[in-house]
Amino acid sequence: MRYDFLQPLSFRLKSFAGHALAQYWTCEFPAAWAGPLREQIFKPATAEGEAEEEVRAIPLWAVNSAIAALMPQVLTHDARARQGEMWLAWSAAAGGKTPDRTRLVEFVKGGLMAAAMHRNQLAERRSRRQVIDISALARILEDFRGEDLHFTRKTLKLGLGDEPESSDYTLVPHALAAHLCTSGWKVVHGKADAPDAGMDGDAAGGDLRAAEGEDEEADSGAVAEAVHTSSWRRTAARDGAELVSWPPHVYESSNGVRYPWSYTLRLSVQTRGLETAAQPRLHVRVGMRRWARYNVFDPKRNIGVHLLSPSPWSDASSPFGLASMAWHPGPAGKKQGFMGWADDLVPTLSRLGSFPFLPDPAEVARNPLAFLEPEPDGEGRQRPPVAGVPYRPGLGKNTGHAVGDGISAKDKWRIFSQLVPALADFAEVDAPCERVPIPSRTRPAAADLLGIDRSALAGAAGSRIEIVLWCDTTTMRDEALNAVAFALDLPVDVADQPEQVQAWRQRFTTAELEVLLRVEPVGQIADDLELDADIKRRNDRLKAAGISRQQQVSRGLGDPEAGTTARFVLVEMRGADGFASVDHDPKMVVRAGAAVCEAVTQNLLPPSASEETKDGPHDDAEQQEKESASSRRERTRRAVSDLLIRQTGLVRPPARHGTKADELTDVACLGLWVVRRTGDFKAVMPLAVATVPDRPHALMRLPYSGWLPYHRAAIQLAGWHRSRTFDKPEVQDFFADCVAESCDGGDLALFTLAQNIRSLCPALTNPHLAADRLAFHPDRPLATDACKGLRHIRLRTNVRDETAQHFAFGKGGPDVQVGVGAGLWASKDNDRLFFATADKPSTAGPGSPGGSRLEPHWGKISKDKEGWKRDTLKDVWNPQLLELLVAVKQSDDSPAAWAALAHQRRFAAAHFADPLMLPVELHLAHKLGEVLLPSHQLEPIQQSESS
């Protein structure tokens, strides 16, 4: 099916003037409260040995969520307590009264005290000292007064030409979400005029009586007559506003097991760049939330819980509270572990409301369905739900959920089309985008991807390379040898290999390349790091273990032979879950040790079923499902491909760039990127990746270096021990230098990702972006002479919902059929703005984009039979929408051609058949950032001569 139009799930906001929702009160968290709390009570943990959970920020999230649950007029809140920023927003629609200061003060005082006592109780259970001085906190709280709260009445000014205030981006989604709930908005799924139109939403598991219709492939939009209804309720989302269909829909299996699930709606306000007048937009994101029904347990991560408001003052707009519970192991060596709340919301609600039915976390974990679908009371009356646990894979043993993941295009259209009239007073739907004709691309076959062009590899890595296979099992040794032989077309005879992994080497000489192939037992190199418990400071302990392992790696690899131009190491090693803890995982230090020996590494997982391990076979209870020989072969080939293709920066661009009307040739491409890592990996480092038409591989530019082959840049980063944190001026100057070096008068396409770069380059944000001007600092644009031949395409992804979801439809309109369309799409509002969608990848779920969780559709129900079916149980692929804004172009350019180029560069990876999320230049920059090592593992190794 060909789709000619793409409909973003977005609205253009209109003026709220004259509507009750336009009026609201706002206030800041008083500085007279925040100052003493930060200075005396909730100070960051700095003492040696304090755990991460003891970092003592002001626990305003719990206090604010409790206030919202108890006072439904609260639309939104911010938990940072920053001066000059909105803390609470309160609807002024009901009578125009200001919030009750006395009640708010008591809520804040009680909530902070409850949170503090809860944290002290957790510390006491772990035999640790109390983290908060309750007496000192009580003395500070005594000084809180209602007159400290200052409310300001504001009027929302939104619409064409209105630039929203920063607080409006947060407030408007919550105001509209509350309006939808209080107005009783519902979504009807199915044919509304069917005889059974009164069927309740929980009848989703009932019989299906199908209406007449054509095959889906014949552009039919027919649906069954069964009708289901979704009602909605707010949740206390941390980002944007969220609605969830409530009560949940339920799928009941043939043996009577009930699986509850809900649709979700996330609302956020966004703007676009290079618009003649500011036009705030409301983005809508439709999702799925499956609710856990079995016992849930996760010893490493918190478990989320949605709590229904216990407030007697709650109404239809009152949000769920979002809490989390976790397994608390108790003191070392003592069996005192327990399932408890991991945040302060429930203790705060308990103190402020004294509600008797707040759930016990151990009981919620043991039987979450009992709280989501409680049994009727003693008189047979149905009791309301109390709590729900969102399901995720791996949440306890045997906790699979029958209902699939993802949202079909049909369900998006069904919900969005009924949201349009509900928000007609506040917004109008965005116009659909039209398809731009671009050259088609033939999907490469697997053999084409895994077979490496030896001349291209020689150009990227040099003519003499060394490949080392560090293996633990003969199974993966043989697979790796076969994969290398297949990739480089080498005459390797695996049958000659011994029954145990032993050292082995052989040299192969071809017209393009000389290859030294080595096999070595991996031995202790891939074992858990040995941490010295006598070293008290964690960083010192990790550094000692890391340096020891790096020395083992360096001894194992040895110095390269004279004339060797590149070294590649494939390491058979367990996945992250296979080690005792994150601190025991040796992957990073192995990479660092290899970098000292001028080698790059790639990990290869052992056989999944342990057909052969150095510890022997596992017990049946521990043994995983054995992977097939073909899947093991394919994943080994992919690992070799990643090592020799991606890590050398090999590219394979499409044959044609641009549109069918305006084809582009001989274009160089430059991608700018900022690596951001936190914690042990802390770094803010700019990178640049360039490709030119006459080179089959990418070049990298790092701070303190010139342009390097990709694998050489990876080696430099893996051993990086200079400064890794660069400030704004340094990043801006680096990017300006890269552009100036790349602009040689020829055609140059510059790619940047807004979410990655704009915090350090504010000139690329929407308010400062100017057409045909490139600047990284708002006041220092690059000189025109330095930008000859330059085009700048700024991209945005759906991170933080900055691009909308979408569905596609044909000339007959969405009522006939909707689906997922791949291609380039032109905005009707801006001739420089385009959107790109990708083809469905081979790994996508089997659910049809025209199917639905609730509505049957016509299709194949078996190999030789068609009929009505429903995609309740199938995973559905949800493609991202990539925004392409041609910010800089030359006077006679077609913007569509340069947007098409950016889209087509997503297909330029030499090792990957499906499209990348970003152009290959930005993709390679992002992947290179992954080799940056933790700071405690970067100390240079001093080797003895004998090593």
Image (spheres, helix red, strand yellow):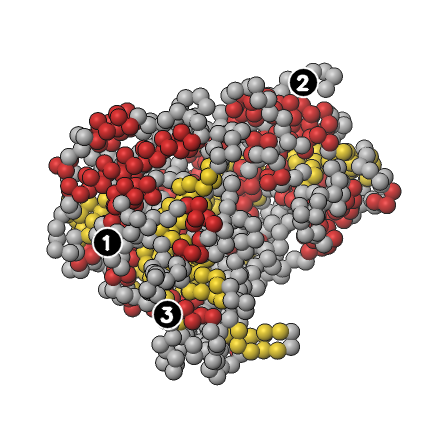
Q: Which mark is residue 73?
A: none
Q: Residue furthest front?
A: 378
Q: Which residue: 25% across, 64% down?
A: 183
- Is residue 14 positioned above or below 868 on the image? above
Comparing 447 with 547, the one in front is 547
Distance from label 1 to label 2 (Cα)?
Answer: 70 Å
Q: Which residue: 27% across, 34% down?
A: 113
Distance from label 3 to label 1 (Cα)?
Answer: 27 Å
Circles 2 and 3: CB atoms closer than 8 Å: no
Disc 1 residue crowd, few under 14, some 14–19, many 20+, Cα 10 Å: few
Name the residue tied to disc 1: 312
Q: Which mark is residue 229?
A: 3
Comparing 290 with 110, the one in front is 110
Residue 343 position in % (x across, y down): 37, 40
Disc 3 residue crowd, few under 14, some 14–19, many 20+, Cα 10 Å: many
Mark nearer the viewer, 2 or 3: 3
In this image, 207 relative to 271: left or right? right
Q: Amino acid at mark 1?
A: Pro
Q: Confirm whether residue 430 shows in the render.
A: no
Quadrant housing the C terminus: top right
Mark nearer the viewer, 1 or 2: 1
Circles 1 and 2: CB atoms closer than 8 Å: no
Residue 265 position in % (x across, y down): 37, 58
- Is residue 386 positioned above or below 188 on the image? above
Of label 2 and label 3, which has the lower sequence position? 3
- Is residue 371 positioned above or below 253 on the image? above
Q: Secondary structure at mark 2?
A: loop
Of label 3 and label 1, which has the lower sequence position? 3
Of label 1 and label 2, which has the lower sequence position? 1
Q: Which mark is residue 943?
A: 2
Q: Confirm whether residue 947 shows in the render.
A: yes
